Image: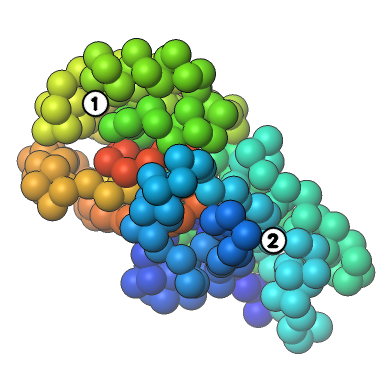
Amino acid sequence: MIRILSDSTCDLSKDLISRYNIEIIPLFVRLGEAEYLDGVNITPKQLYAWSDECGQTPQTAAPGIEDIMKVLNGNDDDEFIIFTISSPMSACYNNCILASEELGITDRVHVIDSQNLSTGIGLLIIEAAIMRSNGCSAGEIESYIINLRSKVRASFVVDTLTYLYRGGRCSGLAAMVGNTLKLHPRIAVVDGQMRPEQKYRGKPQKFVMDYVKDMEKNFLTAKSDRVFITHSGCSEEILKMVSDYLTGLGYFKEILITRAGSVISSHCGPGTLGVLFIDNKN
């Protein structure tokens, strides 16, 4: 049996996890001395309340080697395909490799560095799950996904720079100026790293839609099977605006809306929204 696993930063909804039979390995989230499991016993709402009260960013950590080993215990016939957040961002990938070596099952474990985060990983996972249902081998799936991952287009527009600043990803001056001027940067994942791109201005209804409309040409050359709208706490009004816009293109077969988990939310803060898809250009 081929088992598909991912660390919890894939931000897939419970419905999608169940639909595609995915197993999740949670990361750790630490609020001061208290430790929680992402997606298990901590919510972004709790995280934001603690962060705002303390003026600190939560700490996140990869699952340990022993944690992963427990998940990999199974029948001797099981093969595992494990997706992880981009390796420069976390020790998840390395710890999965070490866990398989410790168990002596490297021949049955395929660890894939997604070179991405959030539903940028989720897009790859769904492709792998569909291939599994079509009878593909683990090796075939791994080879296809490794070639596909460079075509994932993951970007987000951020409402506040405060959380990026608290997490050391933005200078204090930049955060102060950005928040004062109401600048909202677009952050894209390129070669496994987060890179700031252009900046938007205005209220959420404006800057979110400006960000989405800027990608229209890219949407129309995307793989049309599905597109993700992933957010860290946006209003229903904004989510409907984005969903209606994508629906109006008449292009995507499935528009999926998911809520970012606590690990991703701890770094981007509330009000962040991304539209993620796979590029279909040669």
Note whether 159 is above or below 242 in the view shown.
above
Tell me the tag on residue 74. Answer: none
The residue singled out by tag 2 in the image is: 63
Numbered disc in front, either 2 or 1: 2
Residue located at (67% from left, 54% from top) = 62
Image position, residue 59 (x, y; %): 59, 48
Tell me the tag on residue 211. Answer: 1
Amino acid type at mark 1? Tyr
Residue at disc 2, secondary structure: loop
Residue located at (40% from left, 31% from top) = 162
Instruction: Give the left or right position of residue 57, taking residue 211 as reference.
Output: right
Disc 2: CA contacts within 10 A as few (<14), some (14-19) or many (>=20):
many
Amino acid type at mark 2? Pro
Q: Is residue 102 visible?
A: yes
Image position, residue 107 (x, y; %): 84, 64
- The CA distance from mark 2 to mark 1 is 34 Å
Q: Nearer the viewer, residue 92 or 244?
A: 92
Q: Is residue 141 visible?
A: no
